[in-house]
Amino acid sequence: MTATTEKRIILETGSGNDLYGEDYTKAACRAVRDALHHSSIILFRSLDIDHRQMRVQITIGVQEPDKVDTAVVAAELPRGHAEVTAVRGGLNVHDPEQGTTHVIATAAVEAYVPIDAAAWKSSDIA
């Protein structure tokens, strides 16, 4: 009997902003899209892993986490099952001349897939 365990296989980061609307969800979605643009996940096809088995943990950092609609952010993912958490982070830049606040969000996108432990062997590299 082999043990299947979930392993993180991808970590991508991104940033996004909303310069005029103070929309934390819009900034968060842009941060996720930025992170996804850094990633080309060819290993699913190469290793015959069904991408629908992938769990994706998204952590969004913004100054006002309660203003992020996590369901809207989760919908940004083209595959896998998304879990979104908003935490305090990111940056607000106030423009006193215009009376606006620019919202900057950061995103960490982590992908996990079930891996058959017997099918993989790690090597120690000094």
Image: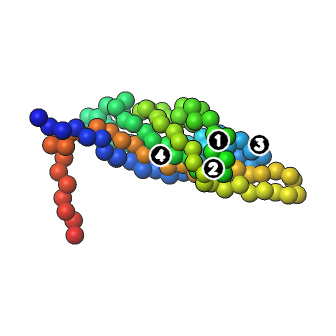
Which mark is nearer the camera, 2 or 1? 1
Mark 3 in CB contact with mark 2 (< 8 angstroms): no
**Residue drawn at 74 percent across, 45 percent down:** 22
Going by the numbered disc 3, the residue's amino acid type is Gly
Asked if residue 2 lies left or right of residue 59, the reply is left
* Residue 123, above or below 34: below
Q: In which quarter of the image is the C terminus?
A: bottom left
Q: Which residue does the image show at 57% across and 31% down from the upper left?
A: 71
Residue for badge 4: 109
Contact flag, marks 2 and 4 (Cβ < 8 Å): no
In primary-sequence order, the first of circles 3 and 2 is 3
Asked whether the beta carbons under mark 2 and mark 1 sit within 8 Å of each other, the answer is no
> What residue lies at 67% left-to-right and 47% top-to-bottom?
64
Amino acid of disc 4: Val
Alpha-carbon span between mark 1 and mark 4: 19 Å
Find residue 78 and report its horizontal and vertical position in percent. 48, 33
For the point 58% across and 36% down, which residue is it? 70
**Residue topped by disc 1:** 66
Real-space Cα separation, disc 3 to disc 2, in angstroms: 14 Å
Query: Which of the colour schemes (rainbow, by chain, secondary structure, one colour) is used?
Result: rainbow
- Kindly identify which residue carries mark 2: 62
Residue with the mark numbered 3 = 21
Nearest the eye: 41 or 11:
11
- The mark that comes first in sequence, 2 or 4, is 2
Classify mark 2: helix, strand or loop: strand
Classed neighbour count for the residue bearing mark 2: other residues with Cα under 10 Å, few (<14), some (14–19), many (≥20): many
SS category of the residue bearing label 3: loop
Q: Distance between the residues labelled 4 and 3?
A: 24 Å
Whole-Å distance between the Cαs marked 3 and 1? 16 Å
Q: Give how far apart the Cα atoms at labels 2 and 4 are.
A: 15 Å
Q: Which amino acid does label 1 sit on?
A: Asp
